[in-house]
Amino acid sequence: MGDKRYSASELMAIMTAKEFRDWEVAFVGIGIPLVAGITAKRFHAPNLNIVYESGCIGPQKYRVDFNVGDSSAADGALCLTSEWRVFSDMQCGYYDVGVLGAAQVDKYGNLNTTAIFGGQDYQSPKVRLPGSGGGNDIGSNIGRVVVMLRLEPLRFVEKVDYLTTPGFLDGSPGARKKAGLLGSGPAAVVTDKALFRFDRQTREMYLDTIYPGVNIEEIKALVGWDLKIAPQLKTAPEPTDEELEAVRAADPANLIMGGAAARKSLAGLDEYIEITVKNSGK
Amino acid sequence: MGDKRYSASELMAIMTAKEFRDWEVAFVGIGIPLVAGITAKRFHAPNLNIVYESGCIGPQKYRVDFNVGDSSAADGALCLTSEWRVFSDMQCGYYDVGVLGAAQVDKYGNLNTTAIFGGQDYQSPKVRLPGSGGGNDIGSNIGRVVVMLRLEPLRFVEKVDYLTTPGFLDGSPGARKKAGLLGSGPAAVVTDKALFRFDRQTREMYLDTIYPGVNIEEIKALVGWDLKIAPQLKTAPEPTDEELEAVRAADPANLIMGGAAARKSLAGLDEYIEITVKNSGK
Amino acid sequence: MTDRNNANKQMSLKDAVRKYVTDGCSITFGGFIGRDCVAAAHEIIRQGIKNLTVIDDSKTDVMDLLVGAGAVKRWEGAYLGYGAIGLAPNIRRSVEKGVPLKIELEDWSNAGISMRFLAGSLNVPFMPTRSMLGTDIVKYNQRIKLIEDPYEGATVALVPAAHPDVAVIHVQRADVMGNAQVWGFTGNDENKARAARHTIITCEEIVSTEEIRRRGNMTLIPFYCVDAVVQVPYGCHPQSCYGYYAYDVLFCGEYHESAKDRDNFLRWLDRYVLGAADHLAYCEKVGWDRLQKLMGLERRFNRIPG
Amino acid sequence: MTDRNNANKQMSLKDAVRKYVTDGCSITFGGFIGRDCVAAAHEIIRQGIKNLTVIDDSKTDVMDLLVGAGAVKRWEGAYLGYGAIGLAPNIRRSVEKGVPLKIELEDWSNAGISMRFLAGSLNVPFMPTRSMLGTDIVKYNQRIKLIEDPYEGATVALVPAAHPDVAVIHVQRADVMGNAQVWGFTGNDENKARAARHTIITCEEIVSTEEIRRRGNMTLIPFYCVDAVVQVPYGCHPQSCYGYYAYDVLFCGEYHESAKDRDNFLRWLDRYVLGAADHLAYCEKVGWDRLQKLMGLERRFNRIPG
């Protein structure tokens, strides 16, 4: 990862892009998941349709979205409708794949996006996070869920402080079904160092694919339980120039990948508009 | 009623029109109730807005509707939406007044539009009627309900064969509330011979207004219970020429009021189109 | 659940009906007396499909035809009347006399059955409603359950989700991918398309996907709810189609007169349905000039942009 | 319930907020991060209204401002984050440190709270949902009830209807009668307008009722759900308004940077809200040229017809 050809965020976007299939309908949050979706459309999934929780179905991606309700999320959409309708369509099983971020994940793929207690409690936590948003709903109802988060200390934990979004719950056989959940649970956890999947029997997360230049011990040290390794551990290929180009084209002002630093490096609104219009082809 | 100045249907439409107030929202079925609504708009309720169960709110009435889903029901509407939404808006209490037809009514204003058993039963009745349609919902949820039907033998009965639409149920105190119903029940029953209302205490239907040229005995003979008479029985005024003109303008080809006979008297589609266009001012 | 999404779901009416409407299946139709799926009902009759369970709100015209043709076993619905025209002759004959065969009835109110489609479209097992309480609808229909609201204690009714095997919905415009746009009232169509296991869209016009994207707010039913797209111009006649053609009250009146007598009805059916190879032949029999006049009438009042 | 319908519900933002948004009331806002009611939130802060209960889905920008200004007592909602920008600084300060005061939290998922608005709009006491099962959302939120579906036996969650005292909803176009038309996504707005006891519509443009009638299908909220109509151009800035102006990501980023520090936030609030007499003064401070540029950007992508 010391390689300066690409950033951690870019690598995560590229690895996530590979989880989409052509003609799928994807429920994708804002930020890197969206960049992954746009990247997939450039390669193996040109007919991927993206749905936003604000009520936008199948937009044309001329510009980047900064939030799910950005008017850009509606650009040239096939259908513009309501939030409650797209969540209900999710509950009907119309969406094939969902992508989710999280602050914490546990070994059964349960996610926390609500609060880091830090010895305190729900009403007064150490860190208040955004809450479920649509995350719980995606984890509850979508067939296949891809989780994206950085592999950093205290993020991969034995038990999440607050279980916002269901993975395989306590990992017991049929736990999701018993709880009344419809989706089949998390399919992959994409990080900046490796990709994890879940054992079909034990429902435990294991190391499936390691990224170039990363070693297993480095990963194990960051995971809060005794991590199992796939019998045939895969190594991810280096991102190609074409992939990196596609990821960067999907975020031309670097405001998604680059964050506050990128915002500050822009000369101002005029430059932002110029970049946006130029890249959109409009 | 032997007076040839107006028909029974015309008189019913004019009497019903008086039940609407300006700026009310009225949930009105097709046929004579609609003619009544249009007539009211010409006089004391110019800002009456009509809602159809197909999902049309506040149309401009250029042409007559033959059913609730006739595209004419949508002409220049303020809002075009769904059936389930307008029924839900009804359940919210947004509609002030509803107008209903029926085959049978009982002394507590309960209506039957489902079946005349005639000694037989629900699955094999003597006469199968249309069923509830939106009638039950209007009777359940709208603040003020006006019922329209002809005062004919076997229509005003002690107990309806099948209770499709709730009036005051068994007439006991708070019967509607106990059942879970929201609306306040029927306010008037408009017929071709008289207008009936309901006692606030006993919830029993009584004779409120008699039409010109009709006598009480004639009415009592057609009602299947011992009908009470208002202490101050009113007599309806004769319809004015203006009222009759308005009613007829609302049904220019006479296809609502005149039925099959009027259809047959038309030369054909061309004449119907000509009358419709001419009357619409379009 | 719909079949896998793909670039082109267009097929002929014959093929769509053959593929999705099978003997003994349950079915619902879009529209609300206006925008009815008349052409699809004719094709179902032509293919001799039987034992249908029709789950619907107010769909008299289509139902009277299907019942008269002996295609229906059971009805779950709210209304079977002809508005200003009268009662439904074939339905009366079936229920009162068992001719040509007796249909089972399950009565709901329009709001009640609407909530069944809403529940189906949300994939929840039931919906609460304040309709039908205190009446014989509840007495004769055991699937309406009265419960005490666990939050505030009043009585409410529960109605179960409807999940018909197939929904047929006629719209003004659709693309071959399956995005369906509707102008005018929308009935329960958005919910029926989602509640059903398979959805056939019939439409006046096929438009490009680019055209769909110009007015995304008009897409009532997105592609992923749709299995088949069929172009059937004048597919609602004699009913109206908002922005396309007006209600043919005289044709409808003539049908109603014919249908009062069983033999006359069968003659009507022979002439317009069984004796017409397809919807094009039906239009021919109705008369293209007549259809054009109905279009001219409608467009004086309602025009769809673009 | 809305006030009595009449021909003209137009009023100033000041009057509408004064009349319907009172100390201690519960409130919800339309939009979904885009089409947010920013101008109305500013006016609520200017009028010094306190102890609000905000019932909402994902309304970070408005919430972070209101919480930072000390206007909120309690939140029932789903999401309080800044999308790609980060966490919500004022909300974190309130929840973690009680600055300026501690808000009570009740967490829901977006689908869960959406169903609360749907139930409210239908005037039914609850809605079933398959979200939130098996999680700590249910553990900490006692108002979610798990029941066994009486039809098929699986576990489902019930959520109670939301009935906020007031809903404020920003739309593109409305007439003075109260018919509100929305382009782009619609969030939960149609349901919020109905679930609330009173509804204030703010809009970019007032149009004639004739103009409304030309596109009845675009009327998301009919007049009878509406108490007040207020024209507030650029009322969503720095959020986007589909067809009118794009998201001002840089302005929003600057707010976010300021809000990380309490004193800087208070200076921001003084400059843009308390130091601005009304929304016109806010626009002046933001700069009309900036707003025009955002409009120019949006209209390259989305144009509303007519």
Image (cartoon, coloured by chain):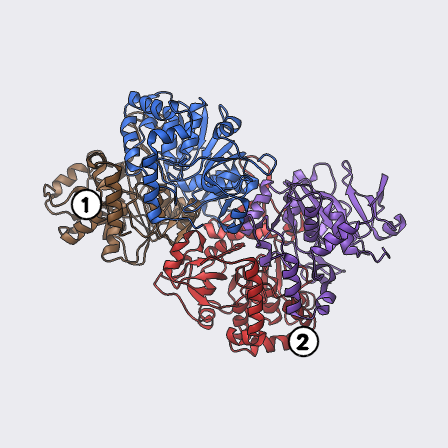
Chain colours: A brown, B purple, C red, D blue
Instruction: Place residue D52 in its image quadrant.
Output: top left
Q: How many marks?
A: 2
Viewer-proximal residue among C125 and D254: D254
Residue C70 in percent (x, y) is at: 60, 71
Q: Which is more toward the observer, D194 or C125?
A: D194
Label 1 packing within 10 angstroms: few (<14), some (14-19), many (20+) = many
Looking at the image, residue B221 sits to the left or right of residue A276; the answer is right
Whether the residues at callouts 2 and 1 have beta carbons within 8 Å, the answer is no
Question: Any mark on residue C264, and which?
Answer: 2
Relative height, residue D256 to residue B27 (above, below): above
Q: Which residue is mark 1?
A: A10
Residue B175 picture location, percent across and down: 70, 39
Q: State which quarter of the image contains the N terminus of chain D.
A: top right
Q: Secondary structure at mark 2?
A: helix
The x and y percentages for residue A256 are 24, 41
Dot 2 and dot 1 within a common chain: no
